[in-house]
Image: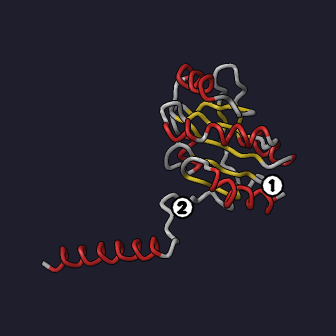
């Protein structure tokens, strides 16, 4: 009889801590830890999407050695992916290389998505099975990862890029590794 009471008490305590963090402005539901941050890009190789040239870990590390690369996991069926399209286009226009991984998507649907919302990507790989996303620790799409010149993941965002997340998180991360 004490087990349900203990479980309810633990849940209540966790809820109270969450409310306390929200009141203090320290609660971010998108602040999901990713085990890849601070580690080398995992080994992978993916084909391209449509006529796009695919890429793997070696290609990504080679490109990042010249300039940090933002890797964006997206899907055509993802509404927040469409919402972040303008921000990705702005970042690409600034010269930030963005490489994409189409997550659990078809070539046709992904192509339509890129035609509709724009294509800010320098390279696009196809992870139709979603296995590479597992190695990256992807929770869902969209997710973005910043790769430094040593091939190490330095920053991660689970969820869509917003003007606020670019200003308060991505830009400082870029300055730190520049």
Separation of marks 1 and 2 at Cα, in angstroms: 24 Å
Q: Residue at left 62%, top 26%?
A: 114
Q: Looking at the picture, does residue 68 appear above or below residue 106?
A: below
| Residue at 68% over, 40% down | 88
Q: Position of residue 8 (x, y in %)?
A: 23, 74
Residue at 55% from the left image edge and 19% from the top image edge: 108
Going from the N terminus, do you reach mark 1 or mark 2 first? 2
Left or right: where 125 falls relative to 134? right
Coordinates of residue 132 in the picture (x, y in percent): 58, 41
Which quadrant does the C terminus fall into?
Answer: bottom right
Camera-near label (1 vs 2) is 2
- The reply to whether the C-beta atoms of the residues labelled 1 and 2 are less than 8 Å apart is no
Mark 1 highlights which residue? 150
Total marks in image: 2
Residue 31, disc: 2
x, y percentage for residue 39?
68, 59
SS for dot 2:
loop
Residue 30 higher or lower than 160, as above or below:
below
As helix, strand or loop, the secondary structure at mark 1 comes to loop
Residue 22: percent from left, percent from top: 45, 70
Label 1, residues with CA under 10 Å away: few <14, some 14-19, many ≥20: some
What quarter of the picture does the N terminus occupy? bottom left
Work out whether 1 lies above or below 141: below
């Amino acid at each position: 009889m004490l087990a349900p009471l203990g479980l309810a008490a633990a849940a209540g305590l966790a809820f109270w801590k969450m409310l306390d963090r929200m009141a203090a402005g320290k609660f971010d539901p998108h602040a999901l830890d990713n085990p890849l941050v601070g580690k080398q890009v995992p080994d992978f190789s993916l084909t391209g999407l449509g006529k796009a040239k695919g890429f793997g870990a070696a290609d990504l590390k080679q490109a990042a050695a010249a300039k940090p690369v933002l890797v964006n996991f997206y899907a055509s069926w993802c509404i927040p992916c469409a919402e972040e399209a303008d921000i990705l286009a702005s970042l690409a226009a600034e010269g930030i290389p963005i490489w994409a991984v189409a997550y659990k998507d078809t070539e046709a649907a992904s192509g339509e998505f890129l035609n509709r919302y724009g294509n800010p990507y320098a390279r696009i790989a196809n992870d139709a099975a979603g296995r590479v996303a597992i190695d990256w620790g992807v929770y869902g799409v969209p997710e973005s990862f910043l790769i430094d010149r040593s091939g190490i993941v330095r920053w991660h965002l689970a969820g869509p890029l917003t003007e606020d997340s670019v200003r308060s998180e991505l830009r400082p991360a870029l300055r730190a590794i520049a």
